[in-house]
Image (cartoon, grey):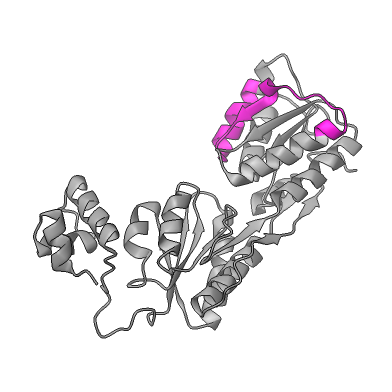
Amino acid sequence: MAGIKDVAREAGVSPSTVSNVLNGKTNMSPKTRELVLSVCDRLGYEPNMIGKSLKVGSNKTIMFSFSDFERKFYLSIIRGISEYVKTKDYDLIICTNKSLEKFMNKAFTNGCIMLDRRCPDSFLLKKAEKNYPIVVMDRIMDVPNIKSVVVNNYAAERDLVQGLVECGYKKFAFIGGFESEDNRERFKAFKDVLDENHIPFKKEHYYDGDYTKKSGYQMARLILLSDHRPDVVVCANDEMALGVIKAFQENGVKIPEDIAVCGFDDTETARMMGVTTVDVPNFERGYLAAQYLLELIEGGTNFDPFLITTNVKWRSTTKHP
């Protein structure tokens, strides 16, 4: 097995430089850091930086990595994860995308729960090939050492949009998030239901948001400037729906009398505002992800994807079917 001196020799740097990079020292240039990490990966070097006295895998720590710190529903997921790992005497750390290379090895953590589309499949596959257990919550990856625990977006969005059709809505707009499995599944369900009910939908009625309230607000202003005034705006999440509602209210648009609005996630604010949405059980989602991860850590071999069921919550921002 390669050691720190092997990495230093291959990278053309000193052993102390390798140590500084692996310890996250800030006095290393990005070029040196990338070189050392790439050599470590190529040689399969994973230092036990917790101490030689500890056996690999005995630190009983798991990691949760997610894409940003502004979307409040993450807090419920974290609570669910934390609740389960406490019962099993594990520790939980939160990690950002930039630190994945450092912490996704058994010297630091026993496994990882991933909810960050910026992390490419290729990176996760590379870690899984080294028998590092991973649970992904934002994509389907049916491979050894990776378990997918994901919301059944397609079924949930179908139920929502079919209900809107049954309410009599004919003119639809859709505000999507950034490119992700969640967004693709939600839009596919939306479009399939409209096609099945012979309701036309043009490409220009799809608006690009980024899952933030600000983007929902901006897209709503574009909708108000367009020739197409929809009966209902279907948003890929609640944050964008709340932005849409704010923009409409500022411009005297009555909801749902003039234009209806709905979201996805059932956040606390959406419940308070009476937004029609899809209830995603995020606490349970985190709890299940942690449960499945610990099963993998303890030698489990069930890598079949697990789909979480959801329910539509009909509230005051749309008619009820």
Residue 161 spot, x, y in % from top left: 80, 40
Residue 130 spot, x, y in % from top left: 40, 66
Write the residue at 81% across / 32% down. Answer: 194
- Residue 99 placement: quadrant: bottom left
Taking depth in this image into account, of 260 and 140 the one nearest to the observer is 140
Taking depth in this image into account, of 229 and 299 the one nearest to the observer is 299
Residue 134 spot, x, y in % from top left: 49, 65
Q: Which quarter of the figure is the C terminus placed in? A: top right
Q: Can you name the residue that lies furthest to the top here?
A: 227
- The answer to whether residue 313 is left or right of residue 145 is right
Give the vertical position of 40 relative to 59 (above or below).
above
Is residue 210 shown to the viewer in this render? Answer: yes
Q: Can you name the residue that lies furthest to the left here?
A: 14
- Residue 59 placement: quadrant: bottom left
Write the residue at 73% across / 47% down. Answer: 154
Residue 45 colored in magenta in the image:
no
Is residue 274 shown to the viewer in this render? Answer: no
Give the vertical position of 164 relative to 279 (above or below).
above
Write the residue at 23% across / 60% down. Answer: 24
State which region is magenta. Answer: 194-222
